[in-house]
Amino acid sequence: MKKLIAFLTIAGMLTIGLGNIAVAQQDQEGEQTEMATDTTAMENDSLTEDAAATEPAPADAVTEEAEGPQGFHQILKEQFIKGGAGFMGIVLVTLILGLALSIERIIYLNLSTSNTEKLLNKVETALDTEGVDGAKEICKNTRGPVASIFFQGLDKYEEGIDVVEKSIISYGGVMTGRLEKGLSWISLFIAIAPMLGFMGTVIGMIGAFEDIAAAGDISPTVVASGIQVALLTTVFGLITGIILQIFYNYCLAKIDSIVNDMEDSSITFVDILTKYQQKNK
């Protein structure tokens, strides 16, 4: 239930961010409309007063506006709008879902990381002072897959060391599966995002050829819009795939680190139980 709440929270935050972008876009369009209306009124007034004296003013205004620096966020938003709401929106949804799953996995994996050396020392001390029950209590109160594996091994201690080893191996596989949960969906989004971009490219090129056929001319002005849409969808699809691939590789590296830690600590744990058994014979 906690994972579901965290996932929905992350997706909601990203959705709210998308809504803010849309609102900002509407505000920008309203401002541009107002600016266009004011500019038209100014041009009409200037034409009635003195056409020759007022012609340079709009040119200067255009020059200043063109020279004004645009931020990366503004440029990205403009290019996203030019790419079209159809496929660009689908690519954006893919990015949001992939990021939500990636962040949920990163949080889970970081919470699953524990100081195994410190845990082994506590378990060994508890075995010497309080016995198996004390060591089980230590593992029960410690989060992470390593502590859970130790608990399963201690729970089978009365059945012998061989049974403990089998229990550790079996439960270790279960914990590894839990660590890898959700990675297949992230991998799916990594594959889908570029495909959607390429599909937008194909559709954009089809539209460009339709424009050529309708106009009977292959001038750049006829095919420019279709080619622009085609290239933008590809770019955003590739960007989405790259971002998700980085998160995916981080999760894989984190899982490998935790699994290696589980295997090393399990070997030491079995040695500790063997020494404890020999001491209490």
Image: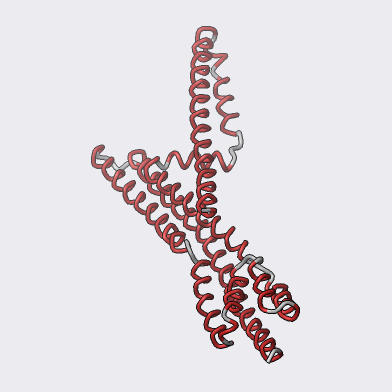
Q: Which of 42 and 111 is in front in this view?
A: 111
Where is residue 93 shown, x and y percent of the image? Answer: 44, 47
- Please give the name of the residue rendered at 50% of the width and 57% of the height, measured from the top-left corner: 244
Q: Which residue lies furthest to the top in this view?
A: 49
Q: Relative to 32, say whether 246 is above or below.
A: below
- Please give the name of the residue rendered at 65% of the width and 81% of the height, measured from the top-left corner: 269
Q: Relative to 32, say whether 7 is above or below.
A: below
Q: Which of 82 and 228 is in front in this view?
A: 82
Q: Relative to 210, say whether 254 is above or below.
A: below
Position of the C terminus, as image quadrant, is: bottom right
Q: How many labels does the image show?
A: 0
- Please give the name of the residue rendered at 39% of the width and 41% of the height, measured from the top-left corner: 84
Where is residue 5 shown, x and y percent of the image? Answer: 52, 49
Q: Nearer the viewer, residue 273 or 182?
A: 273
Where is residue 73 shown, x and y percent of the image? Answer: 56, 41
Where is residue 47 shown, x and y percent of the image? Answer: 50, 11
Location of residue 278 by image quarter: bottom right
Colouring scheme, one of rainbow, by chain, secondary structure, one colour? secondary structure
Does 117 sit left or right of 106 as displayed? right
